[in-house]
Structures are given as structure tokens and as C-alpha cells.
Image (cartoon, rainbow, N blue to C red):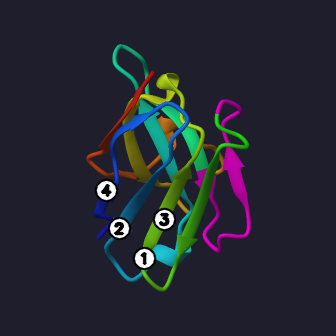
Amino acid sequence: QGQLVESGGGLVQAGGSLRLSCAASGRTFSSYPMGWFRQAPGKEREFVAGISSSGGRTYYADSVKGRFTISRDNDKNTVVLQMNSLEPEDTAVYYCARRPRAGSTWYPDAMEYWGKGTLVTVSS
């Protein structure tokens, strides 16, 4: 219950794209909002993008608006982060997280389950 596994990270040049996927276990995936977070070396973990349980609402950090897109497929228990126009400042470990159904914020401390992360490195 609540296992999350990220994939899709790697090394890419500035201006390139990557597609991250998060596979979730359990039969209640569609009941929970999901989010992507990242943590760069020496920095705190930060919110990147979030999506409501139905997928009808999405939320983005200002730093990624217009470049990243979050989506989900509740039939396949997956949430995807499409990252375009990548910049060296996007280099970080990216984590998938599940927010409680009753939650209302995207602060990292408010998430209830986390994946182990996938590393994204953007070279200049």
C-alpha cells in the first residue's frame, strides 16, 4: 500500500526534454492527489508540480510553469512529469509523492508516501 517507484531520469543537455514516470501500487491510486518534488544538492526538497485525484486540476511551481507538465493515468496507476526546455538549475533528484485525501497544501512535510527518487542532470 502506497509504494511509489520513479523512473525516467538521466543526463540531458540544456534545452532538452525528459519524461519522468511514477508507478504506484494499490487499488486506491485514483483517490489521491499526487505530486512531484525535487531536491538539489545542498538544498531543501521543493514542490515542482501537483495533480488532483481526477487529474482535472494541476499545480506548478513558478520556476517550472510553461516548461513542465504533470499528468496521470488512473487506469495504469501512473503519474507523469514531462519536462521540456530543461535548464542546469533543474538538476536534482526528483521524487513522486502522494498527498493525503484531506490535504490542502503541497509542502513536502504534508505528503504521506514517497518514492526513492530518480536523478535528473542537466548539463550546460
Whether label 4 touches label 2, CB < 8 Å: yes
Asked if residue 44 is among those painted magenta in the image, a careful observer would answer no
Q: What SS does tag 2 mark?
A: strand
Question: Can you identify the residue that label 4 sits on?
Answer: 7
Number of callouts: 4
How many C-alpha atoms fall within 10 Å of the one at disc 1: few (<14), some, or many (≥20)?
some
Residue 29 location (% of width, % of height):
45, 74
Res. 102 in view: no
- Name the front one of labels 1 and 4: 4
Residue at screen point 48% across, 65% down: 79
Residue 54 location (% of width, % of height):
65, 74
Residues rendered magenta in the picture: 50-63
Question: Can you identify the residue that label 3 sits on?
Answer: 79
Q: What SS does tag 3 mark?
A: strand
Question: Can you identify the residue that label 2 sits on?
Answer: 23
Q: What SS does tag 4 mark?
A: strand
Q: Earlier in the sequence, mark 1 or mark 4?
A: 4
Of residue 17 and residue 81, the one placed in the foreground of this image is 17
Q: State how far apart marks 4 and 3 are (Cα).
A: 11 Å
Q: State how far apart marks 2 and 1 are (Cα).
A: 6 Å
Residue 115 location (% of width, % of height):
31, 51
The kind of residue tagged 2 is Ala
Can you tell which mark lies on residue 77? 1
Look at the picture and state if 16 lies above or below 77. above
